[in-house]
Image: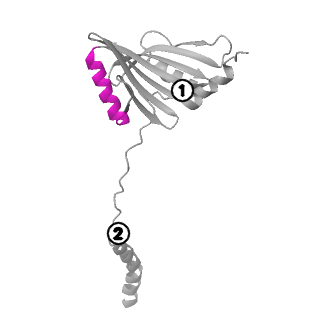
Amino acid sequence: MILCRLGVLALALPAALVAQSATNAPVARAVAIPPATPSAAYRGFAPGVPYKDFVQRARALAVRDRLVCNTAKRTAQVMECGVAIRDPSDSARFYLSASVIDGSVAMLSFHDSGGPGLVDRLRAELTTTLGPGSRIGRSTLEWVYGRKVVRFSWRGRGKARWIYVSLEDRDVTDRISKYVQRRR
């Protein structure tokens, strides 16, 4: 009988020690995760991405017309594309244009028009997303991420406003030099 009790105790002791060490274990501390670093992207579009990724996103957001891309006269490695889009997250409408070099998006531009409130709304949206921008001239803000640049500019006459949000990957735009014909 005593041997039976010692056998049960011998089996139960390791389980009790494991349970006690688990309760005395140091509590894992919550590690503060820094906020995501802003990048040169706007409404799901970014410069430098492959052409096929751009086309897929642009076609998904196209309003009524279809994406049209025209190649350069001298080479098919340089294209200009354009389409009217509507972002389903907030129903914002833009005309989206892109320059593609060697299969990568070099530049993107979003165009829209409206009243003075449009400028204020977009400035607040970009500042919230990208942080405070650097002022360039009277009507342009700029955010620089290495060789990628986001610019927000606006023009106006009376109560009309025209806005442009442009994104550029300078590593891709530098590739255009091999397609430019040099003067002799």
Identified at 70% across, 15% down, the residue is 183
Left or right of 164 on screen, residue 81: right
User: In the rendered image, which quarter contains the N terminus?
Assistant: bottom left
Q: Amino acid at mark 1?
A: Asp
Whole-percent x, y for residue 175 in the image: 63, 27
Residue 122 within the magenta-colored segment of the rendering: yes
Nearest the camera: 61 or 158? 158
Q: What residue does disc 1 label?
A: 53
The reply to whether dot 1 and dot 2 touch (C-beta < 8 Å) is: no
Nearest the camera: 18 or 98? 98
Q: What is the quadrant of residue 182 in the picture?
A: top right
Q: Neighbour class for label 2 at 10 Å: few (<14), some, many (≥20)?
A: few
Residue that protrudes farthest toward the right in the picture? 184
Identified at 37% across, 90% down, the residue is 2
Q: Neighbour class for label 1 at 10 Å: few (<14), some, many (≥20)?
A: few
Identified at 37% across, 83% down, the residue is 9
Whole-percent x, y for residue 104 in the image: 59, 26
Q: Judge whether residue 13 can be spotted in this image.
A: yes
Q: Judge whether residue 48 can be spotted in this image.
A: no
Q: Which residues are magenta?
A: 115-133
Q: Is residue 171 above or below residue 34?
A: above
Q: Amino acid at mark 2?
A: Pro
Q: What residue does disc 2 label?
A: 26
Secondary structure found at label 1: helix
Q: Nearer the viewer, mark 1 or mark 2?
A: 1
Q: Main secondary structure of the magenta part?
A: helix
User: In the rendered image, which quarter contains the C terminus?
Assistant: top right
Residue 76 within the magenta-colored segment of the rendering: no
Whole-percent x, y for residue 28 in the image: 35, 63
Mark 2 or mark 1, which is nearer the start of the sequence?
A: 2
Whole-percent x, y for residue 153 in the image: 38, 22
